[in-house]
Amino acid sequence: MVGGDDRTGRRRCPYLQYYVQSEAHNVVLFNGEGQLKSDVPRGVKEPGEVYHLVDHAGLRYVYADATGPMSPHFSRNFRHFLWVDGVIVIIDDVRAHEKGNLQWLLHYEGETDIAENGSVRVTNGDASVIVKHLFLQNLTIQEKEGLADHAPDTKVTYLSFETSESLNEAKFITAVIPVEPEFSLPEVTALEGHDMLGVRIRSGGKQTDVYLNLRADGRIMHQNCIRKLNGWETDAYLVAVTRPEGADDEDWTNVERCFIGYGSVLRHSGHTLFASMSRATACLELSPAELSVALRGQPYLRAEVRPAVMPQRVTAEGNAEVISSDNGVITVVQSSSMATRRPG
């Protein structure tokens, strides 16, 4: 559905000239340029990395650092995928060495229909998705010509969402919404506040608010990055909170699921729900019957969770272990060989 070419006969010129180049993939370009074209035949010194890999309580998250291959243009080039409530939220956090135009590429298979609001519906047979840019706004859409997957003699069209002004830093937030005829389409809207960008997703009787803390992206390491994001006080880079649709936003006790992306504290109304001595990426599922925890962080991580009601049962995913659960505090430790890395 949403594609990108990566394979063809390697002895043919199109392999090096197009298929392995950045413009053949769904990436962000700077002034129409990506990874150096000489990198593939000569080898890349700086590889990209993938971190965190959370799959818990119906939420999936992964963070990719592609700064190395794109370092001629970018000092930061991070892509975050958060799949929750039937919506894939893609956050591209980029900073260039100088001002220029940015292009967000969309390769696809099938046909496209571009709506007046700039969202794109991609249809391939019975499958369909909607691609909706929430930030940046006022992007122009250009049609580009590329080569078909496994068919270098066939020309195909792909889309380029482009900034109308020169920038050296940007946060792209894009929602990819699979269309499932048997279910109502999730309602996805943009959120914006002081030092915050976000997304609200209403789907299946639930509401998930996703917050991106602009003070926690590494730009001001000498200042406090703790911010209040719609009542949630945190130093986390990314937060997602799920509650029943229509529930009171000011009542933290109705939260059913909570995601913390690289943070050490999350509190509301003076109550600390999550705390760790080091930055962690965590997902909590909360109910009176059970509280389940997934943790990613330093090689050794210790975190505390203080739910509104102590559950009948506490579980931890993977290598995490619950070591105590009393006096309103649940303590979890995690040992991992895959250490976390801050997104900045």
Image: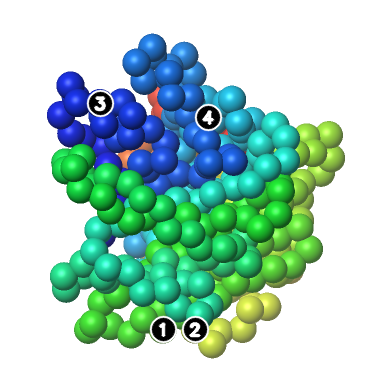
Label 4 residue SS: loop
Q: Distance between the residues labelled 2 and 1?
A: 5 Å
- Report the amino acid beneath label 1: Gly
Label 2 residue SS: loop
Which residue position holds label 1? 205
Which residue position holds label 4? 70
Is residue 330 in view from this perspective? Answer: no
- Report the amino acid beneath label 2: Glu
Q: Which residue is drawn at 21% across and 67% down?
A: 124
Which residue position holds label 2? 245
Quadrant for the N terminus, please: bottom left
Quadrant for the C terminus, please: top right
Q: Residue at x 18, y 34 (%)?
A: 8
User: In the current view of this chain or complex, which residue is farthest to the right?
Assistant: 223
- Crowd band around label 1 with a 10 angstrom C-alpha radius: few (<14), some (14–19), many (20+): few
Label 1 residue SS: loop
Q: Which mark is residue 13?
A: 3
Percent of width and height locating residue 161: 51, 57
Q: Which residue is drawn at 33% across and 56% down?
A: 157
Is residue 40 in view from this perspective? Answer: yes
123 in relation to 40, above or below: below
Observer-nearest residue: 63 or 148?
148
Q: Are marks 2 and 1 in contact (CB under 8 Å)?
A: yes
- Crowd band around label 4 with a 10 angstrom C-alpha radius: few (<14), some (14–19), many (20+): many
Pointer 2 or 1: first along the chain? 1
